[in-house]
Amino acid sequence: MVPLEATLRQRRQAGRKLLVPYVTGGLGGDWLDVVRAYADAGADAVEIGLAFSDPVMDGPTIQAASQRALDQGATPAGVVAALGGADVDVPLVVMTYYNIVFRSGHRRFAAMLIDNGIGGAIVPDLPLEELDDWAGAAGASGVETVLLASPVTPDDRLARLVERSHGFVYGVGLMGVTGERDRVAESTAVLAKRLKAATDKPVIIGFGVSTPAHAAEVASEADGVIVASALMRKRLDGAGPTELAAVVAGLRAALDRV
């Protein structure tokens, strides 16, 4: 397993802006090759979505990708087990909803991740006030739980979020669901500055980062970006590992110029 936070810190220390592309696990028979292609194209970590029938924080593109993966037979256990054979040299982090964690059992789910080389988990619908049981099981197993902060998170709550977040802090750059946008929201830079002032953990911003220009703009204040919907739209349109790797390479090049 490649550790999440330690790896991101090391790369940031070397002057690198961080890139975390997303793929829906189980979407297409070659989805694991997409993970490998991302790593080869310059990703610093890869986020893998576990398909869920009610992805409340996701917009239409990720919802469609999740539903198609489910229709193709994807299951959380199957996707996680497949990642055990990914053989990549970057950290892997799953994005999942709490229903999947709860039904699996906290300790069992955490052990399943670690056993398959996955060092991080994002559980966006698990509030800070109800984090303890999962965080205890995750921490005992070595899973780093990434927490999310939004533009409307009050300062006192933000301080508690960044303290309890591990791996990195996920900044939600705008209010709303995931999806492509024409421009970067003004709230993104403000949130990045607030997070950077509150923690030395890597601050990575997602939601609405859709182009290389967006990535460079966001990374001028943050440590890096997460790109999801822009990649999954191309995936739904038939793009394979090679085409998606070219998009990631373009994002990488833009970040390297920041």
Image (tube, helix red, strand yellow):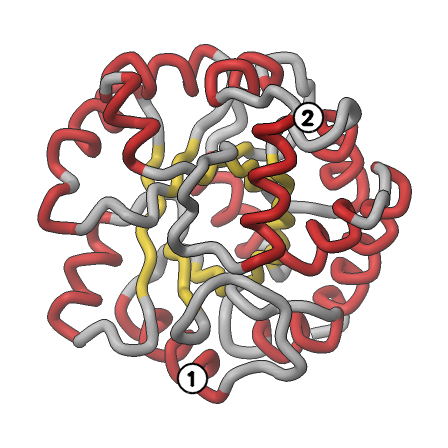
Question: Which picture quadrant has residue 247?
Answer: bottom right
Residue at image x 63%, y 57%?
A: 229
Residue 245, which numbered label?
none
Query: Which quarter of the rendering shows the C terminus?
Result: bottom right
Residue behind mark 2: 88
The x, y position of residue 21, in whole percent, is 64, 49
Residue at image x 43%, y 46%?
A: 55
Q: CA distance from mark 1 to mark 2?
A: 34 Å
Residue 187, which numbered label?
1
Taking 89 as reference, is 57 left or right? left
Report crowding for label 1: few under 14, some 14 to 19, many 20 or more residues within 10 A (C-alpha). some
Question: Which picture quadrant has residue 16?
Answer: bottom right
Residue at image x 57%, y 38%?
A: 67
Residue nearest the viewer, comparing 67 with 227:
67
Taking 218 as reference, is 239 left or right? right
The x, y position of residue 220, in whole percent, is 58, 78
**Identity of the amino acid at label 2?**
Val
Q: Are marks 1 and 2 in contact (CB under 8 Å)?
A: no
- Which is nearer the N-term, disc 1 or disc 2? 2
Secondary structure of the residue carrying tag 2 is loop
